[in-house]
């Protein structure tokens, strides 16, 4: 039975009807970021301005425009979601030693309760210490639930997104959010994305790299088209293998290699798949951001570009001089790469205007201290990706 949502529910009023005869109306082929009556930024402003429960989110759009340090890689853990996926959890142990369970996966030693992960006040205090003006909260990769029964995943994502929207609404001058979506069912993913954007004021969907089909699967084209229609970006961040899906490489099960090497591998594969698989060519207005600098993308750029020109599976358009590089420059990446030399290489190989500051905020590898100087060069890029300019 579908779990009833009682903690927090938002419903927007009906949108005003738009006449196709109005000046500037051009239907689904509206130019990118053009301010027309069908532009999704316009619709989002209308929803936020006419829904009293989300009125505070109007301030988020203004504050984001003024923020000088913006963090787009910041996960949240939500009390309201505990048990929302049934037997899969998630479950947060109350023992002296912290424990977080998702399915048969157990995370030991990470304290979520009483930390910035779950306490908005502690998060804001930590943001002040770090010199961060604005942060976009995102799902915890441990709780994507991309492999459980689709209806259960849909229910979980709705509960998750409503709870996250409630947190954001209390401090919308400092916080925004990406949405969890059930990628194992494309129709459900489209429905929840539209609800999260249009009713909750979220910036777009946040998904893993592995949900049972490759990112270039033609079945996903309708999902990508929906994102273009909504005029929102897609953020992709891996999850450790084996949480609710295939077990993955057994060699990655020690020394945290599943997140140190596994994530980088999945991000690099995602970069290649989106380009080689024609996703960016089929959806020329779609913006996609990958975490952690796209894994090893900067380092293996030469092999990736050479394969695009020479391998038999490459399309004729991809074999043209500069075609791979042009498509790579379409992608966005956060700069959470831990090393100045790695970052310098990334900047030389991808589009520097598509780089964003990300911290993995409150995570094990967040950079300590004040990071305003590191974050501020990327603020204008973040505003463009989030449609705040």
Image (tube, helix red, strand yellow):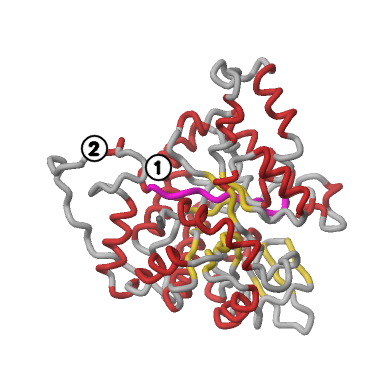
Taking the spot 70% from the left edge, 82% from the top edge, the residue there is: 94
Q: Examine the rendered structure and indicate whether residue 169 appears above or below residue 194.
A: below
Residue at image point 66% right, 15% down? 312
**Tally of numbered discs:** 2
Taking the spot 66% from the left edge, 53% from the top edge, the residue there is: 335
Q: Quadrant of the C terminus?
A: bottom left
Horizontal relation, residue 359 to residue 43: left or right? right
Please say whether residue 240 is one of the residues in the magenta stretch. Answer: yes
The question of residue 342 being in magenta is answered with: no
Residue at 43% x, 63% y: name it: 65
Answer left or right for 340 relative to 6. right
The image shows residue 347 at horizontal and vertical percentages of 66, 44
User: In which quarter of the view is residue 328 placed?
Assistant: top right
Q: Residue 298, relative to residue 235: is it above or below?
A: above
Residue on which disc 1 sits:
228
Predominant SS of the magenta segment? loop
How far across and down, in percent of the image, does residue 263 sit? 72, 49
Tag 2, which secondary structure?
loop
CA gap between label 1 and label 2 equals 14 Å
Above or below — where is 187 with respect to 127? above
Looking at the rendering, the stretch of residues picked out in magenta corresponds to 231-241
Label 1 SS: helix
Q: Are marks 1 and 2 in contact (CB under 8 Å)?
A: no
Between 323 and 7, the residue placed more toward the observer is 323
Q: Quadrant of residue 367?
A: bottom right
Task: Say which residue label 2 marks.
Answer: 26
Measured from the top left, where is residue 333 in percent x and y?
A: 61, 48
């Amino acid at each position: 039975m579908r779990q009833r949502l009682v903690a927090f529910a938002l419903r927007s009023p009906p949108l005003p009807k738009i006449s196709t005869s109005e000046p500037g109306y051009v239907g689904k082929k509206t130019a990118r970021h053009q301010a027309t009556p069908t532009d999704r930024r316009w619709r989002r402003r209308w929803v936020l301005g006419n829904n009293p429960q989300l009125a505070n989110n109007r301030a988020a759009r203004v504050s984001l425009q003024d923020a000088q340090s913006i963090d787009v890689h910041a996960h949240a853990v939500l009390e309201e979601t505990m048990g929302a996926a049934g037997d899969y959890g998630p479950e947060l142990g109350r023992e002296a030693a912290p424990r977080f369970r998702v399915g048969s996966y157990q995370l030991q030693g990470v304290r979520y309760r009483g930390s910035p992960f779950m306490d908005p006040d502690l998060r804001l205090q930590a943001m002040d210490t770090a010199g961060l003006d604005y942060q976009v909260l995102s799902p915890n990769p441990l709780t994507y639930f991309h492999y459980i029964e689709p209806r259960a995943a849909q229910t979980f994502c709705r509960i998750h997104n409503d709870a996250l929207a409630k947190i954001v609404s209390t401090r919308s001058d400092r916080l925004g959010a990406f949405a969890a979506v059930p990628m194992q069912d494309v129709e459900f993913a489209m429905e929840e994305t539209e609800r999260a954007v249009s009713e909750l004021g979220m910036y777009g969907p946040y998904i893993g790299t592995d949900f049972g089909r490759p990112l270039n699967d033609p079945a996903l084209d309708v999902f990508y088209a929906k994102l273009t229609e909504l005029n929102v970006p897609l953020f992709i961040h891996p999850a450790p293998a084996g949480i609710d899906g295939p077990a993955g490489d057994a060699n990655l099960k020690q020394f945290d290699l599943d997140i140190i090497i596994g994530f980088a591998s999945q991000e690099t594969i995602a970069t290649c798949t989106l380009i080689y698989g024609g996703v960016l060519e089929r959806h020329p207005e779609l913006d996609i951001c990958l975490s952690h600098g796209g894994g090893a993308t900067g380092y293996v750029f030469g092999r990736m570009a050479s394969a695009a020109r020479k391998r038999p599976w490459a399309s004729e358009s991809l074999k043209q001089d500069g075609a791979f590089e042009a498509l790579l420059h379409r992608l966005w990446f956060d700069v959470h790469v831990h090393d100045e030399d790695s970052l310098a290489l990334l900047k030389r190989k991808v589009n520097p205007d598509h780089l964003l500051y990300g911290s993995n905020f409150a995570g094990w590898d967040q950079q300590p201290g004040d990071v305003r100087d590191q974050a501020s060069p990327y603020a204008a890029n973040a505003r463009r990706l989030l449609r705040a300019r």
